[in-house]
């Protein structure tokens, strides 16, 4: 389970950097999504900082909408320290490893611990609630 959580963290960090939502070097500035890598996921887990792993499919309109919402949310000062890793839902191994069923899944972590998991969230308020608990 720890390996899966680590992978998810890295995915969120990677995803945010590719979407401009997270930064792998300066977490308190503009967030940029990063494409998932195990090393980023492990680093995010070790940091004990919050991060999110997003599973998105390229031609998914819901995923694109979710990415827009995340981009807006991660610009807010209270969320700038968050990292986002994005996993391509077509990566069957990662999808299986994280036990993800839907291509618009968000998994939120605090350090090594998975805090929440959702799919289909398309409102900023709902995603914000997932992050803040």
Image (tube, rainbow, N blue to C red):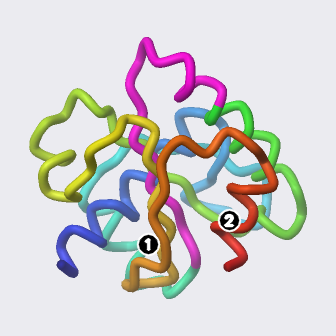
Secondary structure under the numbered disc 1 in the rendered image: helix
Q: How many marks?
A: 2
* x, y percent for residue 71: 73, 40
- In what quadrant of the picture does the N terminus appear? bottom left
| Lateral position of residue 109 relative to residue 22, left or right | left
Foreground pick, 124 / 32: 124
- In what quadrant of the picture does the C terminus appear? bottom right
Residue 58 lies in the magenta-colored region: yes
Residue depicted at 46% across the width and 84% down the height: 111
What is the CA distance from the residue labelled 1 to the residue labelled 2? Answer: 11 Å
Asked whether the viewer can see residue 13, the reply is no
Residue depicted at 37% across the width and 52% down the height: 11
Residue 4 lies in the magenta-colored region: no
Residue that mark 2 sits on: 27
Dividing the picture into quarters, in which one does residue 97 lie?
bottom left
Q: What numbered label is drawn on residue 102?
A: none
Foreground pick, 39 / 56: 56
Task: State if disc 2 and disc 1 touch (CB < 8 Å).
Answer: no
Residue farthest to the top?
59
Dividing the picture into quarters, in which one does residue 86 lie?
top left
Residue depicted at 58% across the width and 76% down the height: 50
Mark sitting earlier along the chain (1/2): 2
Q: Does residue 108 sit above or below 47 in this rendering?
A: above
| Lateral position of residue 51 relative to residue 75, left or right | left
Q: What numbered label is drawn on residue 44?
A: 1
| Lateral position of residue 26 relative to residue 39, left or right | right
Asked whether the viewer can see residue 113, the reply is yes
Part of the protein shown in magenta: 50-65
Residue depicted at 39% across the width and 85% down the height: 113
């Amino acid at each position: 389970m720890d390996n899966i959580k680590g992978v998810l963290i890295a995915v969120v960090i990677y995803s945010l950097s590719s979407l401009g939502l997270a930064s792998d070097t300066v977490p308190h500035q503009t967030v940029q999504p990063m494409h998932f890598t195990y090393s980023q996921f492990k680093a995010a887990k070790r940091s004990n900082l919050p991060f999110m792993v997003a599973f998105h499919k390229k031609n998914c309109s819901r995923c694109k909408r979710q990415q827009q919402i995340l981009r807006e949310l991660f610009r807010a000062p209270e969320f700038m320290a968050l990292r986002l890793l994005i996993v391509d839902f077509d990566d069957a191994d990662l999808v299986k490893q994280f036990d993800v069923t839907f291509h618009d899944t968000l998994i939120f972590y605090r350090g090594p611990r998975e805090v929440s998991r959702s799919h289909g969230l398309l409102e900023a308020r709902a995603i914000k609630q997932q992050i803040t608990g």
